[in-house]
Amino acid sequence: LRNQDDGEIPTVKTSSERHHTSTSESTVASRENTSGLKPFNWSPQWQKQQETVRYNDDDVPVHVVEELDVTTMPRDPDAPGENGEGIIDDDLEKVEEAFKIASFNQHVSDQISIERSLPDVRAEGCNASLVGDDLPTTSVIICFCEESWSTLLRTVHSVINRSPPRLIKEVILVDDASSRDHLKKKLDDYMTRFPQVKIIHLPERAGLIRARLRGAAIATGEVLTFLDSHVECAVGWLEPLLDRIRLNRRAVVCPSIDVIEMRTFRYSSSGHMTRGGFDWRMHFRWNTVPDYEMARRKTEKAPIRSPTMAGGLFSIHKMFFEELGQYDPGLEIWGGENLELSFKTWMCGGTLEILPCSRVGHIFRQSQPYRFPGGGMQTVQRNSLRVVQVWMDENHRKAFYAVNPELKYMNISYGDVGERRQLRERLGCKSFQWYLDTVYKEMRVPDLTFQASGELRNLGLNLCLDTLGNTEGSLALYPCHGLGDRQSFLYNWENHLRHEELCLVPYFPPPEEDRPAELHIDWCEGQDEKLIWKHTRKGKIMHVQTSLCLDVTDDKRRPILTECRKTSRTQRWKFLKYFDK
Ligand code: LR7
Ligand code: MN
C-alpha cells in the first residue's frame, strides 16, 4: 500500500494499454472483450439498470450506470412508504409500544415494503458521472444488536438490490449477541436466499467496535464498507465510494447520510452542505461546509473533505484499515471509534470525504434498544478518553480536561493506551495541531482562562443545574451525578455562563403571565449586556443588567431569577472548580 497514490488525488487513472479511435459510446455487449464487463441486471425489475462503457479524454474506458427512473415502478406506486414517503400513524398505542421496543416507529416500518423505492436526491450531475471500470470489490459489514426485523431486512435488501453484484464480494452480518428470537434461526433461514450473505452470531456481547473487527477479520473484499443495521441504500450509492478508493487507496469515504424520520419513516435529503466535526466534549457534530472548502470544490457533486465521520457508514480499503491499526480494540460498546478513525485517517496520510453522489438513509433515533453493560455515559466517556490520550497533543489534552473537569475528578480508568501510542509513533503520524490547521481550520482550541468550570451546584438544595440535553430554551435542576456532560458549565473571564458554545441568559415571560424570569440556554451572539453575570465569593450569581439573582422555584425543579436577598439558601451556588487568572 505504501508508495502508491500519495500526494494529490488524480482525477482519472490513465492507461497506455488501451487504444480506441473514437470517444463514442457502445453498449457493454459489443465491447465485452475490451472492457471485461458484462451487462448486469438484477432484481427487482423496477431497478433494472443498463450499463454502457464510454471512453474519457485519455481514452480510458469508464462505465456509467444509467438507472431507470426508480420513482416509477410497476408495483403500486401509492403503496405505503413508496418513493420514501412517510406514514402518519394514528394508532398511538401501537406507536408507543413500537418506540419502547425499537426506539423508533417499528409499527410504521412493518407496513412498508422492504424493497420500497426512494427518491433520487443526489447532487446535480451525479447520475451522469463516470466511474472506473476496474472498481475494487467490497465486503459490506453490518453489525447489529437487537435490531428490528423489517429494518434489518430493508437494509440488506437495499444493499443487494442497489449494488452491482460483481462489486459485492459478500455481505457480512455480525449479530452482537442479540436476544431477540427473530435474529436467530429465522434470520439464518431467511438469508439462505442470498448466497453472498454470511452471518456471524457472537456468543457474547462485543460492542459495535469489536463486532466490526470480527466482521473485518473474515472479509475477503478489497474494500470494507460498514453500515448500520437500519439504513436504506439509494440508487448508485456504491460506485462513487469505490471509485474514490480506486483513485486513492488511502481515501476513506462516506456516503451522504440522508434522514429516515424515526416516527414516519419519511426519507429526506440531508442536502449537500454538511460535513463532520466535533466539540471539546468529544461529541460528533454536523457542521455547515465552511467557505474555504466550498471554494476548493468546483461543483455541487464534488467530494467534501470532512474533519470527522459520523462513524456508521463508510468505505475504507482493507489494507489501509489494517495499516491504521483498525479500531482500538479497547473501545467498548459504542462511541469514540468514529473520532479515532477520523483523526488517524487525516494524521497518518489519508483523506476523509463525504460524497454528495452517494446516498444512504439512516434512522436517527434518540435512545437505543440495547443495554450498555457499563452504563451509557460512562462507556462513551471512557472511550473518548482513550482517543484523547492517544491522538491529541499535550495542549489539546489540557483543553479537553479544562472543558470537562469532571473527567479528571472521576478518575476513570481508561486502560492501557501504550500500544496505541506506539502505533501513532510507528506510522509517523502528523500532530493534532497539523490536523486542526489543515482540515478543520474553523475549529478553535478553547481559551483555558475560565474563572470556574464543571457542575454548578445549588448549595441550599444540593441539586445541580442541568440542560436536559436542550440546546435552547429552559434549564432544570437535577440530582448531581458528577459525570459532567449536561451538568457541565463554564464561567469565563468575560463573565459569561456557558454550556459548550451556548450561553445562559434570563428569559422574561410576558407580563400578563405573572411568572418570575427563567434561566434559558441560547446562542451567545449579539446579546452583549444580557450575557454578563457576577458570581460572588458568597455564592450569589447576579445578572448584572437586571440586578436579579439566580434562584430556584419553590418546587425545586427550575432555575429562576429573583430579587437578591442578603441571606438566602437557594441563591447560593458553587462550581466544581475555580481558577486564578
Ligand atoms: O453493542 C452494540 N453492538 C452493535 O452491534 C451497539 C450497537 N451495535 C450496532 C447497532 O445495532 C447499530 O447497527 O451498531 C450500530 C450503531 O448503533 P446505533 O445505531 O444504535 O447508534 P448511532 O446510529 O447513534 O451510532 C453512531 O455512532 C456510533 C458511535 O459508536 C457508531 O459510529 C455508529 O455507526 C454511528 N451511526 C452513524 O454514523 C449513522 C449516522 C448517525 C449519525 C450522526
Ligand atoms: Mn444507527
Image: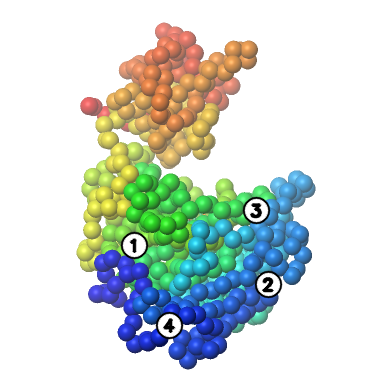
Which residue is at the front of the view, 412 or 231? 231
Asked whether the residues under the numbered discs 1 and 4 touch, taking CB atoms below 8 Å apart as contact, a structural biologist would say: no
**SS at badge 1:** strand
- In this picture, is 314 found above or below 539? below
Asked whether the residues under the numbered discs 4 and 3 touch, taking CB atoms below 8 Å apart as contact, a structural biologist would say: no
Q: Residue furthest top?
A: 566
Looking at the rendered structure, the kind of residue marked 1 is: Thr
Query: Mark 4 Cα within 10 Å, few/some/many (few <14, many 20+)?
Result: few
Asked whether the residues under the numbered discs 2 and 1 touch, taking CB atoms below 8 Å apart as contact, a structural biologist would say: no
Which residue is pictured at 67% across the width and 63% down the height?
Answer: 71
Question: Residue 351, which numbered label?
Answer: 1
Which residue is pictured at 27% across the width and 70% down the height?
Answer: 6
Query: Mark 1 Cα within 10 Å, few/some/many (few <14, many 20+)?
Result: many
| Residue topped by disc 4 | 22
Query: Mark 3 Cα within 10 Å, few/some/many (few <14, many 20+)?
Result: many
Instruction: Point out the tag, 2 or 4, that comes first from the N-terminus.
Output: 4
**SS at badge 2:** helix
Residue 461 point in image, percent of width and height: 49, 23
Camera sees residue 127: yes
